[in-house]
Amino acid sequence: MVVVVTSVRLDDQLCFALYTASRAVIAAQRPGLRDLGLTYPQYLAMLVLWEEGDITVGRLCRRLHLDSGTVSPLLRRLEALGYLTRVRSDTDERSVTVALTPEGIALGGRADCVYESLTAAIADAAAEEPDAPGPETENDERASFDPASLIALRTTLHDLTDELRRHLDAPAPSKGTRS
C-alpha cells in the first residue's frame, strides 16, 4: 500500500541530488585519501594549509564553512599524526595559529593522488559503453563529464552556495514591512 502525504518526491529534491553527488565524489576520492591516511574533512583542512601556510583557526573555519567545535577535534587528530602544530597567541589567548610541520608539507607533495582518484573514476565512467546506465539529459543522452562541463558545474555550485549564504545571513525583514 502506498501512502501519499506529500506531493514532494525524493528524486525531485535538489538537496538529495547534491547529497548523493557529494557522497559519490567523496567515494571516488577514497583511494587517494586512503593513500594519504586522511579522512575527507582532514584532507580539506590540509588543502587550506597547503594553500595558505600558517593560518588562524578562525580563518580555517571560515574557509571550510565549519564551526570551531567541528574543526578543533579534526586539528587535534592532524596534530597527533604529526602534520601540524597549534600555537596559542601570546597577545590574544583566544587566537590559535595552525602551522604545517615538515611531515605535513611532505604529505602535500603526495596529495595529488586524491584528485587523480576522482579524475580516474570520472574517466572510467565516461568510457563505459553508451548503453550502460548512467546520468541522462532531457534528450536521453548521457551527461557530459568533460573538464569544461565539470568546471561549469563547480562554478554553478559555488554560486548557489554564495547566494544561499547571502540570503540566509541577511537580516530578517522587520515585522510590518514587505520585501
Image: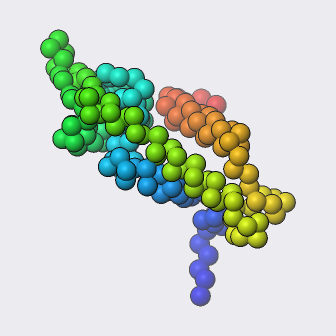
| Quadrant in which the C terminus is drawn | top right
In this picture, is 98 found above or below 157?
above
Q: How is the image coloured?
A: rainbow
Question: In the picture provided, is 150 more to the left or to the right than 84?
Answer: right
Q: Quick check: 19 left or right of 136?
A: left
Instruction: Give the side of residue 10 with respect to residue 138, left or right.
Output: left
Q: Residue 44's spot in the image, x, y percent?
A: 40, 39
Image quadrant where one finds the N terminus: bottom right
Q: How many marks?
A: 0
Q: Residue furthest bottom?
A: 1
The residue closer to the viewer here, 38 or 94, is: 38
Q: Residue furthest right?
A: 139
Residue 1 shows in the view: yes
> In this picture, is 12 found above or below 45?
below
What is the x, y in percent for residue 16? 56, 58
Q: Nearer the viewer, residue 45 or 73?
A: 45
Q: Using the image, determine if residue 139 lies above or below residue 173.
A: below
Q: Position of residue 35 (x, y in %)?
A: 37, 50
Left-right relation of 85 to 159: left
**For the point 80% across and 60% down, which residue is it?**
141
Q: Can you say whether 106 is above or below 22 in the image? A: above
Q: Residue furthest top?
A: 91
On the image, which quarter does residue 99 sit in? top left
Question: Which residue is at a point 62% across and 58% down the rendered structure image?
Answer: 124
Q: Is residue 26 visible?
A: no
Q: Nearer the viewer, residue 143 or 178?
A: 143
Residue plotted at (31% across, 21% down): 54
What x and y, as percent, mark residue 49?
36, 29
Residue drawn at point x = 64 percent, y = 36 percent: 155
